[in-house]
Amino acid sequence: MSEKFYIQNFNMQAFLTTPKYNKFYIYKTPTTPYQRFCNAFGYHRMVNTRNPAYPKISLCIECNNAWKEFRHKSKEDIESKISEYLATPIPIQGFMQINQSQPGSSQSLKPTQTNQVLQSPIEEIIIADSTPPPNAAAQKKAAETINATNMKLAELQQIYNSTNDLEIRNNLLERMATLKQTLHDEDNKIKKLKRHAGYQ
């Protein structure tokens, strides 16, 4: 009686890739130091978390908090911080493929990405001016409503990204659509108030 021995050969290949991070993720055409700061801060956060689809609303809330520390600093300090954020080094992420071969058969496993990113259902958001005039009570109230709505949207978005249940997702999308409409309404209110103030 003879015995046959099969030797399995494993060939492991490593692939390196550099994810793409958008330096204009929040504002596509920034025109103010605040908007440029937010874009740079967003790029910095996305790179550090290795998440090129970082939830925009959460990102903007974090950016507003960071901006409070810099908005009263000199132009040079702000520009220096923006340059520092934009120079954040991008880490290389690895992919791995294992090829297993034996007589009469071959099997190849598809590359598996180490970090999977959930896409956000919210493409565009509205950010309130963090420094309305001190005597503009109506603008301040609308800005507070926008910031509170952004926080609610961020919470719903986190729930959305954590579930695969289609019914729950559809319900969340409806609620988020209502909140986004609130954002647009309050944003339009602020614009009208600013125009009215400009005429006086």
Image: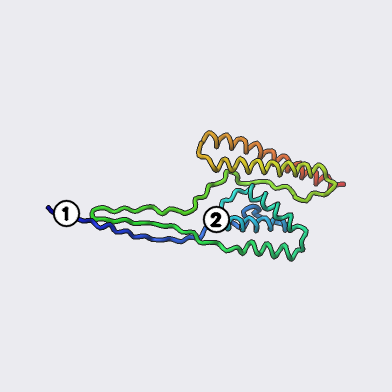
Amino acid tagged 1: Glu
Callout 1: 10 Å neighbours few (<14), some, many (20+)?
A: few
Tell me which label, 1 or 2, sits earlier in the chain: 1
Give me the C-alpha separation between circle 1 and circle 2: 51 Å
Above or below 131: residue 149:
above
**Residue at position x 36%, y 60% in the image:** 12
Spot occupied by residue 128 in the image (x, y as percentages of width and height) = 73, 47
Foreground residue among 82 and 2: 2
Spot occupied by residue 176 in the image (x, y as percentages of width and height) = 62, 38
**Apparent side of residue 121 relative to residue 186 in the rendered image (left or right):** left
What number is the disc on residue 50?
2
**Apparent side of residue 35 relative to residue 89 in the rendered image (left or right):** right
**Residue at position x 18%, y 55% in the image:** 4
Q: Secondary structure at mark 2?
A: loop
Spot occupied by residue 133 in the image (x, y as percentages of width and height) = 82, 49
Quadrant location of residue 6? bottom left
What number is the disc on residue 3?
1
Residue farthest to the front?
A: 1
Amino acid tagged 2: Arg
Marker count (numbered): 2
